[in-house]
Image (cartoon, rainbow, N blue to C red):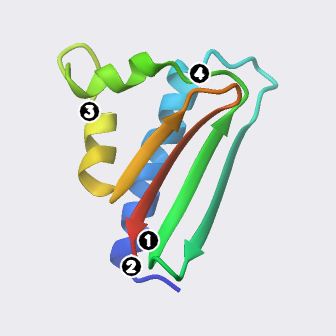
Amino acid sequence: MVGSRTADDVRTVATELIGNAVRHGRLEEDDRILVSGMIDEIHDVVRIEVEQRTPITVAMTDRLTSAEESGMGLRIVDGIATQWGLVEGPPGVAWFEVDR
């Protein structure tokens, strides 16, 4: 079980990462985005993974340094998530954790 603040944080960050997959993932019409999550009671965090068929390029992390050229999505992720990262793939996976 998680509180409403944690649930809000999970929804916000997941929405940003799913939106990035849709906008930047070069997905085909029939491609799927797989979202999975778990509560890690040992580390007291919620972990979410957003997987897409296509690779995630390391260039996505450059968006943190240049908000003028792109949106604020990864800055939001960075500000809310306790930890987050990218697995280039394929499949490409963006993951994050937030404290419970």
| Labels in figure, total | 4
Picture layout, residue 18 above or below residue 82: above
Q: Residue 63 carries which label?
A: none
Q: Is residue 64 left or right of residue 27?
A: left
Picture layout, residue 10 above or below residue 26: below
Question: Where is mark 4, residue-wise?
Answer: 25
Question: Is tag 3's residue or tag 2's residue first in the polypeptide sequence?
Answer: 2
Whether residues under marks 4 and 3 lie with C-beta atoms below 8 angstroms apart, the answer is no
x and y percentages locating residue 13 in the rendered image: 41, 51
| Badge 4 amino acid | Gly
Cα–Cα span, label 4 and label 3 = 17 Å
Dot 2: what SS? helix
Cα–Cα span, label 3 and label 2 = 23 Å
Question: Where is mark 3, residue-wise?
Answer: 72
Question: Is tag 4's residue or tag 3's residue first in the polypeptide sequence?
Answer: 4
Q: Nearer the viewer, mark 4 or mark 2?
A: 4
Whether residues under marks 2 and 1 lie with C-beta atoms below 8 angstroms apart, the answer is yes
Q: Which residue lies furthest to the right in this view?
A: 30
Cα–Cα span, label 1 and label 3 = 21 Å
| Badge 2 amino acid | Ser
Whether residues under marks 4 and 1 lie with C-beta atoms below 8 angstroms apart, the answer is no
Question: Is tag 4's residue or tag 1's residue first in the polypeptide sequence?
Answer: 1
Question: Where is mark 2, residue-wise?
Answer: 4
Dot 3: what SS? loop
Closest to the observer, 14 or 63: 63
x and y percentages locating residue 89 in the rendered image: 65, 27
| Badge 1 amino acid | Ala
